[in-house]
Amino acid sequence: MPEFISADHIAAQNGAFEPQRKNNFTLVISIDQNRLLQRSLDAFPLPKEANEELAVNYANEVRKVAGRAVFENLELVLKDFADQGVGQLLIAWRRQVYDPTTGKIGLAKEYKKSGEVVMFAPDGTLQRTWTLIGCWPSKLDPGGGDMNANENNKILCTITIDKAIEGRAGSQGSQSSAQSFGV
């Protein structure tokens, strides 16, 4: 018989193994002084990283080593509010990338922004952060109309990033850091 078959360690009175809830997170991007994106946030994946494989052929065999590091695009889902300008904020940022009236592509130094993903415990204490570097909207879907639907419109925005670094410089995971994000 297994030695440990009890779940007594999960969310125990002594404070061990507190589950991380998926809804205890936020995103802050430097384009948003009024935090419209943060307040409209519906869903957002945590940053995913991988290395491309570099194959080295020799005789009848192949050896694989780590190649370039890549970070997946992040699919941002936002609630669309009629009385807030979250759609306009994203369109203005997107226009820094590409302007369809002139056909011009913007300069990276003007459209790339920094950001931060924060996951926190249910009491608001800070647990984990990712600093996002080189964020820009590569795709924007403002949602759509449907006369048969009885649901909120969602705005979808693909955020391309250069990299994500887990942790924040100088942070020790304090509650005051979490509160600075409006948690």
Image (spheres, rainbow, N blue to C red):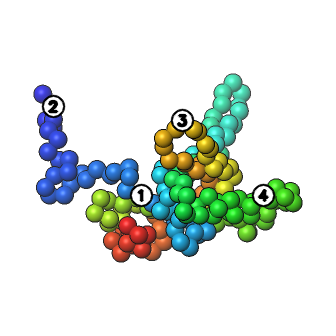
Comes first in the chain, label 4 or label 2 = 2
Residue 2: give its label: 2
| Mark 1 or 3: the one toward you | 3
Comes first in the chain, label 1 or label 4 = 1
- Determine the residue positioned at 13% across, 55% down: 13
Q: Quadrant of residue 55?
A: top right
Query: What whole-number distance in Å separates the C-alpha atoms at marks 3 and 4?
Result: 34 Å
- Determine crowd level at label 1: few under 14, some 14-19, many 20+ residues with C-alpha closer than 10 A: many
Query: What whole-number distance in Å separates the C-alpha atoms at marks 1 and 2?
Result: 36 Å
- Amino acid bearing label 4: Tyr
Query: What whole-number distance in Å separates the C-alpha atoms at marks 1 and 4?
Result: 30 Å
Q: Secondary structure at mark 1?
A: strand
Query: What whole-number distance in Å separates the C-alpha atoms at marks 4 and 2?
Result: 60 Å
Task: Point out residue 114 in the picture as x, y percentages from the top left corner.
Answer: 60, 66
Comes first in the chain, label 1 or label 3 = 1
Residue 148: give its label: 3
**Residue ranking furthest to the right:** 102
- Determine the residue positioned at 33% across, 71% down: 175
| Mark 1 or 2: the one toward you | 1
- Amino acid bearing label 2: Pro
- Determine crowd level at label 4: few under 14, some 14-19, many 20+ residues with C-alpha closer than 10 A: some
Circle 4 residue: 98
- Amino acid bearing label 3: Asn
In the image, is residue 148 above or below residue 109?
A: above
Circle 1 residue: 25
Whether residue 181 sits left or right of residue 93 in the image: it is left
| Mark 3 or 2: the one toward you | 3
- Amino acid bearing label 1: Phe
Where the N terminus falls, by quadrant?
Answer: top left
